[in-house]
Image (cartoon, rainbow, N blue to C red):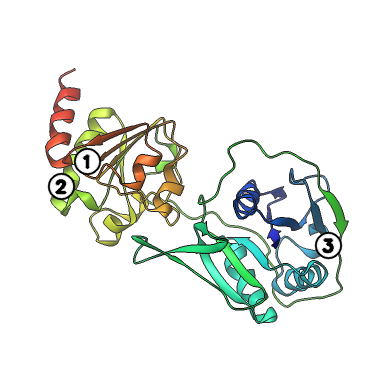
Amino acid sequence: MKTLLVAEYREGKLRAEYTQLIAFARELQAEAAMFLVGNSTDLPKFDGTLYLAEAAKHGEYSPAVHKQLLLDVIAREQPQQVVFLHSSYGWDLAPRVAVALKAAQVSEVIGVDGGLPVVPVCNAKLRRTIKPTTATTVLTLQAGAFGLDDEPTGTPTVVAVDTDATGKVQCTGYEAAKIEGVDLTKAAIIVSAGRGVGKPENVAMVQALAKALGGEYGASRPVVDAGWVEHSRQVGTTGNTVTPRLYVACGISGAIQHLAGMKKSDFIVAINTDRDAPIGEVANVLVVADLKQFLPVLTEKLQNR
């Protein structure tokens, strides 16, 4: 299977997430080439063909221009899959390319099963394997779903690409989201509440443990969506991506979107009644217990140190 990986360039730098594209291709055991609108002085470590268009001419993002550049490369490579990151760039460009190719698009891919993309369904509680029927499929990869076990290596064979296409829309810059309330990205210790806390009153136990540890409290998306905790404390792909020294997950099953936001923590403790919960795959310590019984005891021990 031939796969074309679409890397990204933002604010004058190659985005490091290109390694997730390589990891996906490896898992698929696909023959891969890569496309980038970027700079020849900042190239991905990749053993393969890199189709490179200069951002200085074509902009870091111009929908019509980047689409045409990519369509020209697709016509040359004839890949069975065109793979984007599930990012603002991918969200906008992938469907444009899919429509132009009359190709199926599969978004938020989190795995591969028998060479077919796997996506989350039912609020990430279940997974579905998709079998596209078009000759080419356009994919976006869920952030953090694929990763390399080692540092990428290699030097690409660069093929310059160009176009005279123009567009009416062009990216002129980036604006960081305003952070309201606590900034979890700067916290050294985070204790997060998941759906397993049961009811909003039990979030207080998570808050008490966070205070006893000298940290901040966070939450998974279901807890935030239920209105139990404010959005500024959400951890995951639609909230904060955090890297604390200690992360304590309380009643969090471990949906891929949540794991992507916290799995790079230095040390992870998970407290869950289900010993087979996905969170156990990334946890350094898994405590199989009822958090409503365990958290008050642990908090008291810490307070009486």
* Badge 1 element: helix
Q: Position of residue 274 (x, y in %)?
A: 24, 45
What residue appears at the point 63 percent right and 78 percent down from the top-left corner?
134
The answer to whether residue 181 is visible is no
What residue appears at the point 60 percent right and 70 percent down from the top-left corner?
92
Residue 272's place in the image compared with 54, above or below, is above
* Badge 3 element: helix
**Which numbered marker is on residue 206?**
1
Q: What residue type is labelled 2?
A: Asn
Q: Which amino acid does label 3 sit on?
A: Lys
What residue appears at the point 13 percent right and 50 percent down from the top-left corner?
201
**Which numbered marker is on residue 202?**
2
Q: Are marks 1 and 2 in contact (CB under 8 Å)?
A: yes
The image quadrant where one finds the C terminus is top left
Q: Which residue lies furthest to the front in this view?
A: 114
Residue 135's place in the image compared with 40, above or below, is below
* 252 to the left or right of 89: left
Q: Distance between the residues labelled 1 and 2?
A: 7 Å
**Which numbered marker is on residue 57?**
3
* 58 to the left or right of 11: right
The answer to whether residue 197 is visible is yes
Q: Where is residue 33 in the image (x, y as percent from the top left)?
A: 75, 57
Q: Nearer the viewer, mark 2 or mark 3?
A: 2
Q: Distance between the residues labelled 3 and 1?
A: 51 Å
